[in-house]
Amino acid sequence: MCGIVGLFLKNSELEPKLGALIGEMLIKMSDRGPDSAGLALYSRPTRFNMKLTLRFENLSSVKEMESILCKELKDKFSLKFRGSHVVLQFLIADYELVLTLLSELKSAPRILSKGNAIEIFKEVGSSVDFVNQFKVNNFNGTHGIGHTRMATESLVTLMGAHPFSTGSDQCLVHNGSLSNHNSVRRNLIRRGIQFETDNDSEVAASYLSDKISSGMTLEVALNSSLDDLDGFFSFVVGTKEGFAVLRDRIACKPAVLAETDDYVAFGSEYRALTDLPNINEAIVWEPEPATVYFWKHNHENF
């Protein structure tokens, strides 16, 4: 049993409140997943067109990284600290150089996400502690998805926490269990895909990224997963433009959607949505089995 939340803002005036709104949604799902918590939050572009979310084991490596970047990139980067994570922004033309510099640090960081808009934060522990530690309430953004985990398929570790990001500006959160994840993992490894955990949800995320990189749209890739991934699942997939929702054909994992003129919200249970603005005026429904739902912003504005 895990908890999933998602919030897609139609009304730009709500963007300064994204963190506060989705943070409260995540806290309401605490008892569905006490082991770890995480959020993928999306914001509008800045003057930099690439960002990495980094997790360092050793804070001295952060100072080492900052010193090297100042020398190599001058003023063509920025660092933002949030909890135990660092968001590094820079120009995409320097991407390969940045990766090389990071790999040469005495203690190289884990890269939790990459892209133009995405930032991923996740830690072991309760969602209440997570929201406070990462100062989620002050995040200004366009949309986000989150997860509270009750570990069933792998160890309780930072890397086992959701969201899993396996593509640029793309991530997945998952409630359920995949029975054939080992065979799917082996097939993906043969295609050159690397894995950081033994978590079945990372397999689902990598499966979708592989399909998309081969030319499928997200909708087609999700529909394909209904045939290729065995088990019970509710998926919420984040992209730069928005988020998608899919439940398996049996749909035994709980899920609810709510839509107003200002937002679309997803929760594993309705109580995750109860503090959203004008929720009493929302259209509320249970997503149908084996049906892809997708909301996205106008790409030209992002």
Image (cartoon, rainbow, N blue to C red):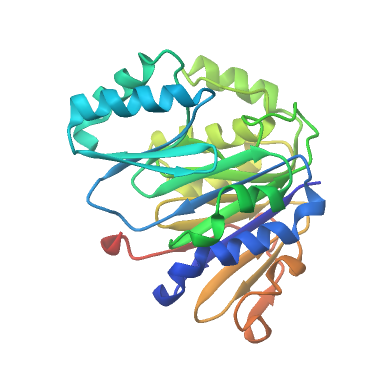
Could you say where residue 3 lies in the image, as x and y percent from the top left? 73, 52
Residue at screen point 67% across, 21% down:
183
Q: 51 above or below 147? A: above
Query: Which corner quadrant of the image does residue 229 belong to?
Result: top right
Residue at screen point 30% across, 54% down:
45
Residue sitting nearer the eye, 129 or 37: 129
Q: Residue furthest bottom?
A: 281
Tell me if residue 202 can be seen: yes
Residue at screen point 18% across, 38% down:
75
Residue sitting nearer the eye, 242 or 180: 242
Q: Quadrant of the C terminus?
A: bottom left
Q: 210 above or below 192? A: below
Could you say where residue 30 lies in the image, as x and y percent from the top left? 77, 53
Residue at screen point 38% across, 27% down:
63
Residue sitting nearer the eye, 247 or 101: 101
How many labels, in total? Answer: 0
Specify whether 96 is left or right of 180.
left
Specify whether 142 is left or right of 26.
left
Residue sitting nearer the eye, 31 or 222: 31
Could you say where residue 238 lies in the image, as x and y percent from the top left? 50, 50
